Image: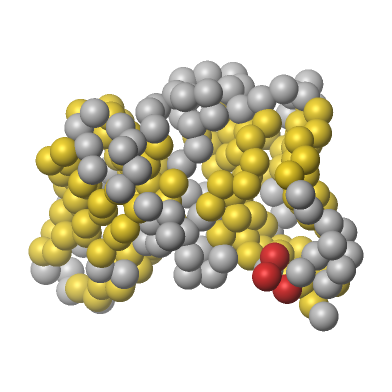
């Protein structure tokens, strides 16, 4: 079967760095997505990786290793507004999105 | 504001009621989706429409009935639901089904409670 694993919850301190990991086993691979979802709001697109390596977007970076079936989302200089759930999703060989259950990130002052 | 609007935001219904969820996108996208989001579970894809044609029905019970009258509007008709159907129902759109990036744009969801 197809599976995406990510931690259920993480806690970090304002101003620090946090890394949210995502591992996947899917039927084929056509890209990996990270979305952010604040409580009671719509998920919003953060990043897309289809080739191995690091993609940087301001304070957020996303890394992919296709051979290891592994990605991480790196958040730097954490702010209180970064408290949210982070969803990892992989597009399989049929271009279907397979979703993880999300990681709830709690930022403490 | 994501360009995808869902109404109502909250809905409480009994098991014998009939209600509908509405989604409208103002992005000129060709594909629209219904997802179910339950606490601590992955998003569950329910239905996919591409150019108004249904391309995916992920073994969804017939008490959920989608309708896509045009590429900007999507409905989810609900009847004789069960308490376990209580969840957040998210609508999303994308430019097409398999674009280069193909990110989804989500609405804020309709929180459904079935009594």
Left/right of residue A6 with respect to residue B88 in the rendered view:
right
Q: Residue at x 21, y 46 (%)?
A: B73
Could you tell me residue B72's position as x and y percent? 23, 43
Q: Is residue B36 above or below residue A34?
A: below
State which quarter of the image contains the N terminus of chain A: top right
The spot of residue B46 in percent (x, y) is 33, 43
From the viewer's perspective, is B19 left or right of A65? left
Q: Quadrant of the C terminus of chain A?
A: bottom right
**Occupied quadrant, residue A65:** top right
In this view of the protein, which residue sits in the foreground, A45 or A22? Answer: A45
Task: Tell me the residue at 31%/38% (across/down).
Answer: B28
x and y percent of residue B9 in the render? 31, 69
- B80 with respect to A21 (left or right): left
The residue at the point 22 percent across, 57 percent down is B22
- A94 or A73, which is in the foreground? A73
Q: Left or right: A87 with respect to A12? A: left
Is residue A105 at all visible to an observer of this figure? yes
Q: Which residue, as the protein is rendered here, is positioned at the far bottom?
A: A109
Q: Nearer the viewer, residue B17 or A34?
A: A34
Q: Nearer the viewer, residue A24 or B91?
A: B91
- Colour style of the rendered protein structure: secondary structure
**Residue visible at 68% across and 70% down?**
A81
Q: Is residue B54 visible?
A: no
Q: Position of residue B86 (x, y in %)?
A: 34, 66
Q: How many numbered tags mark residues here?
A: 0
Q: Residue furthest right?
A: A16
């Amino acid at each position: 079967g197809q599976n995406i694993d990510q931690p259920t919850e993480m806690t970090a301190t304002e101003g620090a760095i946090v890394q949210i990991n995502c591992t996947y086993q899917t039927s084929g691979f056509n890209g990996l997505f990270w979305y952010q979802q604040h409580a009671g709001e719509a998920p919003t697109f953060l990043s897309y990786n289809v080739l191995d390596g690091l993609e940087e977007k301001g304070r957020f970076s996303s890394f992919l290793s296709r051979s290891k079936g592994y990605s991480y989302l790196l958040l730097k200089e954490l702010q209180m507004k970064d408290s949210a759930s982070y969803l990892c999703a992989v597009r399989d060989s049929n271009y279907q999105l397979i979703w993880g259950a999300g990681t709830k990130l709690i930022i403490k002052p | 504001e994501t360009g995808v609007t869902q109404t109502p935001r909250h809905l409480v219904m009994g098991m014998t009621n009939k209600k509908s969820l509405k989604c409208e996108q103002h992005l000129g996208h060709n594909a629209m989706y219904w997802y179910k989001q339950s606490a601590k579970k992955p998003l569950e894809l329910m239905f996919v429409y591409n150019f108004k044609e249904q391309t995916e029905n992920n073994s969804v019970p017939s008490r959920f009935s989608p309708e896509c009258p045009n590429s900007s509007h999507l409905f989810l008709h609900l009847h004789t639901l069960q308490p376990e159907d209580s969840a957040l129902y998210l609508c999303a759109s994308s430019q097409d089904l398999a674009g280069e990036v193909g990110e989804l744009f989500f609405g804020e969801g309709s929180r459904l409670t079935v009594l």
